[in-house]
């Protein structure tokens, strides 16, 4: 067996072909196999997809991991509630904007959102666990949507003007 064979869970099913899925949020590998396919074939099938599996698992690891409710999460929320408004006020001022409302929420797929009509930005609670430079990047990104709604040339020129190293921060935030 190959040393880098990914760990997987095998289900035997009434199906015609081998199926492999990498399941969120933790990248568990699940293989469904027809009953007659020998284990050696299944192992070779998984081993042949090791690089693809690793790529998907890395991508999942860089997604925000939802925090579970509890006292630790509440402590993070309090910390972010204290830190975020001052940062929003600072960056809104720097960008010539009236500071919008800010909300803090547990989110699974995004670091932040901006409701341009209600002028409210929402940041992911998980940012409380990350470097403040990354929280700032998310705040500036969402504030930039109050100037330009789309992710277009104008949006990126707003980002470049106010946070020249935003690409680097984004890379760190997304884990690559
Ligand atoms: Zn955006």
Image (spheres, rainbow, N blue to C red):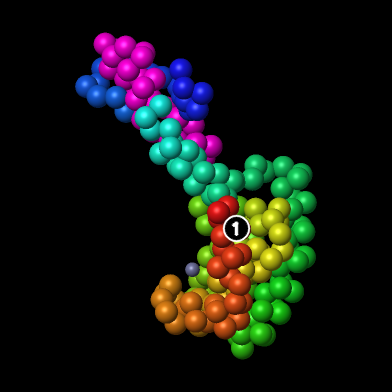
Residue 113 percent across, percent down from the top left = 53, 65
Residue 146 percent across, percent down from the top left = 52, 79
Residue at 34% of width from left, 25% of height from top?
A: 45
Q: Name the image quarter holding residue 103.
A: bottom right
Q: Which stretch appears magenta?
A: 20-46
* Mark 1 close to ligand 1, CB under 8 Å: no
Does the segment drawn in magenta span residue 23?
yes
Pick the front one: 169 or 148: 169
Q: Is residue 115 visible?
A: yes
Would you name the residue on which mark 1 appears?
Answer: 173
Q: Name the image quarter holding residue 12.
A: top left
**Vertical side of 144 occupied by 56: above or below:** above
Residue 59 percent across, percent down from the top left = 49, 47
| Side (left or right) of 72 relative to 115 | right
Q: Residue furthest bottom?
A: 96
Does the segment drawn in magenta span residue 15?
no
User: How many labels sit on residues?
Assistant: 1
């Amino acid at each position: 067996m190959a040393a880098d064979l990914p760990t997987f869970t095998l289900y035997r099913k009434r199906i015609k072909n081998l199926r492999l899925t990498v399941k969120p949020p933790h990248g568990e590998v699940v293989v469904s196999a027809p009953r007659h396919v020998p284990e050696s074939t299944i192992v070779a099938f998984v081993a042949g997809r090791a690089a693809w599996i690793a790529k998907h698992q890395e991508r999942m690891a860089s997604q925000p991991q939802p925090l579970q409710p509890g006292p630790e999460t509440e402590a993070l929320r309090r910390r972010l509630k204290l830190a975020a408004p001052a940062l929003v006020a600072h960056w809104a001022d720097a960008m010539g904007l009236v500071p919008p409302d800010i909300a803090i929420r547990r989110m699974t797929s995004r670091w932040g959102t901006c409701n341009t009509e209600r002028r409210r930005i929402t940041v992911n609670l998980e940012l409380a666990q990350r470097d403040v430079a990354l929280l700032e990047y998310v705040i500036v990104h969402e504030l930039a949507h109050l100037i330009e709604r789309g992710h277009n040339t104008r949006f990126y020129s707003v980002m470049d003007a106010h946070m020249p190293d935003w690409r680097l921060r984004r890379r760190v935030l997304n884990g690559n």
